[in-house]
Image (cartoon, coloured by chain):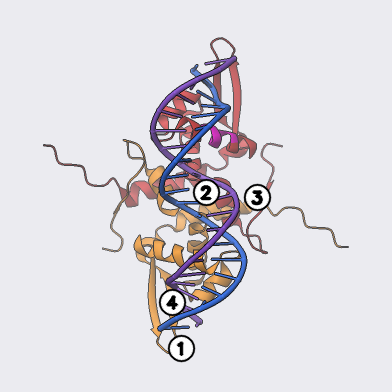
Chain colours: A red, B orange, C purple, D blue
Amino acid sequence: MSDRRREVECAGEDWCPVTATSALVGKKWHPVIIHHLLRHDRLGFNALLREVNGISSKVLSESLGDLEEKGIVARKQISEKPLRVDYSLTKFGRTLEPVITAMRNWGTERLEPPEERTEH
Amino acid sequence: MSDRRREVECAGEDWCPVTATSALVGKKWHPVIIHHLLRHDRLGFNALLREVNGISSKVLSESLGDLEEKGIVARKQISEKPLRVDYSLTKFGRTLEPVITAMRNWGTERLEPPEERTEH
DNA sequence: CTGTATCCACAACGATACTG
DNA sequence: CAGTATCGTTGTGGATACAG
């Protein structure tokens, strides 16, 4: 079940796989979150907050809820006191690996950080 | 020059290739536009408007300007009267092919259109 | 044909503070 | 530790009309 095809809407009359994919993982932070979950397998909320550099806890929380709803991310509560939670990719979520890998490779090969400030 | 690495900012202190890639092609329509330019090589404005199902001329115009500024899309004026313009991918833009292909493949394999309305 | 100009609605994001 | 609440800002997109 968790690796079945998903029904996804798509703007316009004709359905387009690229548009649909963009709708699912096209938010700014979604690919980054998935990227880190691919690398670490399972992460707690604050661990993710540290990994996903630059995201706020509000946006991370919303994004995880969104990805969970779409069946890409699974949330599992580990303990009550102290509260511990693990986020991981579902089987379906892991099928996104080629997409994330392609993005990471392209970024690595074709992009680079802006020039460093010179020391002073 | 047109296939050199690009300097791209990225939220947070640490630079991340996935975040940077998401910043460049993470807008809703960007991957779709690139997808169609990969398939058709060169397209006029209205042809693109028809191909990219569901986009408005305003958003297409903005997106093309954005992609042109980033060195991904090239605009070429073919004739003055009547005004004809061709959009195509730059050499740099074509390096995105694996990313778009991965998205298209995933969408094709893992997603599907919502259930058709039954005829009545 | 190839766009721009407006105006508007709403989604996305960030900072900060606060809760169980 | 794992979030939510609030507020404000910016981004994104759609409809419609208009322009060279």
Where does residue B65 sit, x and y in percent of width and height? Answer: 40, 65
From this viewpoint, is residue B106 visible? no
The verdict on a common chain for dots 4 and 2 is no
Q: Amino acid at mark 4?
A: Asp
Is A67 situated above or below A87?
A: below
How busy is the neighbourhood of tag 3: few (under 14 within 10 Å), some, or many (20 plus)?
A: many
Q: Secondary structure at mark 3?
A: strand
Please identify the quadrant where the C terminus of chain B is shown: bottom right
Q: Secondary structure at mark 4?
A: strand
Q: Which mark is residue A26?
A: 2
Q: Amino acid at mark 3?
A: Leu
Quickly name the residue at label 1: B82
**Majority SS type along the magenta span:** helix
Q: Amino acid at mark 1?
A: Pro
Q: Secondary structure at mark 2?
A: loop
- Give the foreground label among 1 and 4: 1
Q: CA distance from mark 2 to mark 3?
A: 15 Å
- Residue at 30% over, 63% down: B2
Contact (Cβ within 8 Å) of mark 1 with mark 2: no
Quickly name the residue at label 3: B111
What residue range appears in magenta? A60-65
- Residue at 76% over, 53% down: B115
Looking at the image, is mark 1 or mark 3 earlier in the sequence? Answer: 1
The verdict on a common chain for dots 3 and 4 is yes
Give me the chain letter of mark 3: B
Q: CA distance from mark 1 to mark 4?
A: 13 Å
Question: Which picture quadrant has residue B76?
Answer: bottom left
Q: Amino acid at mark 2?
A: Gly
Q: In the image as oriented, which residue stretches furthest toward the left? A: A120
The verdict on a common chain for dots 2 and 3 is no
